Image (tube, grey):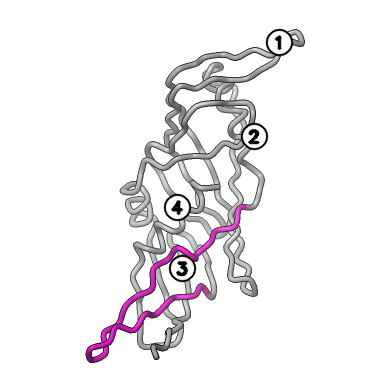
Amino acid sequence: MVLVMTFFLVFLSGGKPADAGTQAVTITMPAEILRQTISDSLPLPIETQNHYMEGSIVFESLEKLQINEKSIFLQGVVLGRDIVMNTKIAGQNIKMELGNVKLPVTCELFLRFDKQQKILFVTPVFPEAGKNDNVDSSDILQPLLSSLGGKEYPVSFDSMEPFLFKVGSRNIPVRLVPDDIQTMKGTMVIKMVPRVSKSH
């Protein structure tokens, strides 16, 4: 899922090494700093990858971010442009043109880091619509949430740019390889191992 992957790539690009003198580099970011970093990158496109909905959808704003022991809780607003819902009524395929809509979204991201593969897996979970929710918004949102939630999405770190260290007249690229990724209450901690590319 592009949205989830972009969140974590934005976070990592905004993080700062806590101690470059040791073998393991620790990047620590409090929830509020992570929220602001993600907010500065918005809007972000969402790929729905289903046949229920047509149109462009973006994550427009992030209103709340809370880091828990094993998950990250998000609240924000999704903006849909030129939305068309494909449905079936009495056996007939119907296209419902809804135009532009703004939808409140609540999501919890569960993280699993595979140390052997060096891959972070993120599973978004969307709560079911409550009884007091607006019926129209619920009907519009449910197909999208059903298609995105409950699946593991791998987050690739290949697009991370290496750090450049200048030694004399040479620039030596140092790439940070993820070694462990954990969340604790209020903070996300990532341990990275530097890999130096030797120049010839």
Tag 3: residue type?
Val
Of the residues under marks 4 and 1, which one precedes in the sequence?
A: 4
Residue 58 quadrant: top left
Task: Looking at this view, name the residue that lies furthest to the right.
Answer: 91
Q: Farthest residue toward the top?
A: 90
Foreground pick, 189 / 161: 161
- For disc 3, the marked residue is 189
Crowdedness of circle 4 by 10 Å Cα count: few (<14), some, many (20+)?
some
How far separated are the C-alphas under marks 3 and 2?
30 Å
In this rendering, the label closer to the viewer, 3 or 4: 4
Q: Nearer the viewer, mark 1 or mark 2?
A: 1
- What SS does tag 2 mark? helix
Q: Earlier in the sequence, mark 1 or mark 3?
A: 1
Q: Quick one: SS at disc 3?
A: strand
- Asked if the stretch drawn in magenta spans residue 112, the answer is no
Residue 63 shows up from this direction:
no
Mark in front: 4 vs 1: 1
Q: Determine if the magenta segment contains residue 172.
A: yes
**In terms of sequence position, does the residue under pointer 1 or pointer 2 come before the other?**
1
Q: Horizontal placement of 60 versus 158: left or right?
A: left
Front residue of this view, candidates 109 and 6:
6
Residue highlighted by disc 1: 89
Asked whether disc 4 touches disc 1, contact meaning CB atoms under 8 Å apart, the reply is no
Q: Which mark is residue 70?
A: none
Residue type pointed to by label 4: Phe
Residue 181, image x, y percentages: 53, 68
The span shown in magenta is: 153-178
Residue at 37% x, 80% y is 173
Task: Say which of marks 3 and 2 sits in front.
Answer: 2
